[in-house]
């Protein structure tokens, strides 16, 4: 660790709340899938911004939109109108389904909005069925909906009204429905939960169940949306269209913004005075949303994900056949999880030492969320480095037996 890195970490220790397990890396510059640290070293990032960097860092179309809009007007109170908000909403609807949009500043706020809308629509029914191992955010209602007890510790009592069932178990969801049930909330792929993919039959079964029992189907696509899995939204593979669609992360091309898309039949549930946001749907954020959509569409990034993801998963499955440490490879598109037979944290550290950035979730699952703009050469290089780290770790483990 260089002196410049140590100095920054020392200042963080003094002035910034210690709420993250940060790696000893101080990033000062980034472009595409590459970042540079304060010491001038270059890294390849296969997990940019926890999925926020889906267009890569500093996509030129997004940065141009940001600079241009900042010179006109950055913020307009939602007491007034501005033309970019309806345009961004229309673009989001065009990529999903007919409805209306409420813009937020983050994914957690989108979850909170959906919970409020659902309870108000339920007229007394208030229980939402959620999944074990799910993750929906760290604000209080989103945290209460999250199906991971480790995140609940110290924050009890949680908000009531959430019933947890096993993921991918339609029978368990059916059994959990009561006269108090108002909705089902699910991620098409559990990201923080270990990159666990919902079966197509599970999602279509939930849609059918919700129709039969007059429940709302809420899909949390905060991590899977905006082309991450090769379609605009992951639900489009199964055709299980939700009543409420939640998105954020990649939505602004790196700028913080989230959204709830609600079917048009739900448009009148939240009325003036029932819900609001100070910053959500700002001209600055909406300009970035429009630029992100334009980049994905005109640069044919969905096609790119579908083509390069074949390479990604072919290489990962080949590694599984050769490296005993790998137990399972899961995912879809540019969202990959590698389940190990031991902790993945040493692999993350070994990769960082080799100038590759990846993530570990659920202690044993390596997670990759490459930018949709990554080049084939960069992907090949990243996978080669990952292979080196896995092979070295497997040798150490075998020698210790």
Image (cartoon, rainbow, N blue to C red):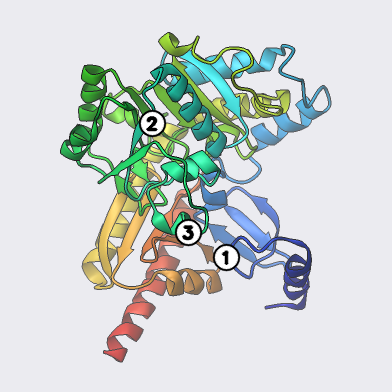
Residue 118 in the image: above or below residue 272:
below
Could you give the CA–CA distance between mark 3 and mark 1, rounded to whole angstroms? Answer: 17 Å
Res. 153 mark: 3
Q: Looking at the image, how many numbered discs can be counted on the residues?
A: 3
Q: Is 86 left or right of 136, judged from the image as shown? A: right
Q: Badge 2: few (under 14), some or many (20 or more) residues near its Cα, within 10 Å?
A: many
Q: Nearer the viewer, mark 3 or mark 2?
A: 3
- Sequence-wise first label, 3 or 1: 1
- Residue that carries the numbered disc 1 in the rendered image: 21
The extreme right residue here reads: 71
Q: Report x, y in % for residue 263.
A: 42, 15
- Sequence-wise first label, 3 or 2: 3
- Residue that carries the numbered disc 2 in the rendered image: 219
Q: Nearer the viewer, mark 3 or mark 1?
A: 3
Residue 113 in view (yes/no): yes
Q: In which quarter of the image is the C terminus?
A: bottom left
Q: Report x, y in % for residue 302.
A: 42, 33
State the residue at coordinates (52%, 33%).
112
State the residue at coordinates (24%, 30%).
177
């Amino acid at each position: 660790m260089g002196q410049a890195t140590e100095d920054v970490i020392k200042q963080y220790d003094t002035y910034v709340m210690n709420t993250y397990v940060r790696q000893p890396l101080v990033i000062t510059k980034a472009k595409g899938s590459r970042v540079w640290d304060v010491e001038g070293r270059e890294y390849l990032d296969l997990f940019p911004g926890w999925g926020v960097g889906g267009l890569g860092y500093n996509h030129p179309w997004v940065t141009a939109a940001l600079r241009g809009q900042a010179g006109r007007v950055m913020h307009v109170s939602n007491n007034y109108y501005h033309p970019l908000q309806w345009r961004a909403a229309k673009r989001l609807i065009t990529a999903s389904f007919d409805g209306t949009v409420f813009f937020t500043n983050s994914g957690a706020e989108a979850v909170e909005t959906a919970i409020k809308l659902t309870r108000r629509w339920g007229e007394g029914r208030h229980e939402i069925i959620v999944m074990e191992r799910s993750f929906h955010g760290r604000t209080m209602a989103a945290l209460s909906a999250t199906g991971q007890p480790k995140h609940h510790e110290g924050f009890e009592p949680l908000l009531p009204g959430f019933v947890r069932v096993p993921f991918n178990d339609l029978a368990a969801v059916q059994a959990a429905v009561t006269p108090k049930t108002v909705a089902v909330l699910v991620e098409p792929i559990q990201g923080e939960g270990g990159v666990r993919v919902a079966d197509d039959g599970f999602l279509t079964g939930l849609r059918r169940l919700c129709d039969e029992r007059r429940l709302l189907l809420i899909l949390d696509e905060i991590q899977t949306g905006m082309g991450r899995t090769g379609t605009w939204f992951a639900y489009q593979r199964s055709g299980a269209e939700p009543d409420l669609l939640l998105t954020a992360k990649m939505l602004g091309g790196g700028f913080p913004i989230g959204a709830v898309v609600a079917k048009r039949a739900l448009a009148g549930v939240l009325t003036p005075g029932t819900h609001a946001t100070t910053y959500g749907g700002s001209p600055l954020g909406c300009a970035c949303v429009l630029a992100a959509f334009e980049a994905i569409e005109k640069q044919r990034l969905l096609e790119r994900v579908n083509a390069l993801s074949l390479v990604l998963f072919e290489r990962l499955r080949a590694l599984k056949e050769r490296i005993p440490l790998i137990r399972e490879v899961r995912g879809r598109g540019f969202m990959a999880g590698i389940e190990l037979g031991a902790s993945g944290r040493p692999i993350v550290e070994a990769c960082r030492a080799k100038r590759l950035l990846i993530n570990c979730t659920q202690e044993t699952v390596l997670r990759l969320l490459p930018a949709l703009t990554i080049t084939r050469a960069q992907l090949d290089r990243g996978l080669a480095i990952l292979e080196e780290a896995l092979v070295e770790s497997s040798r150490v483990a075998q020698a210790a037996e």
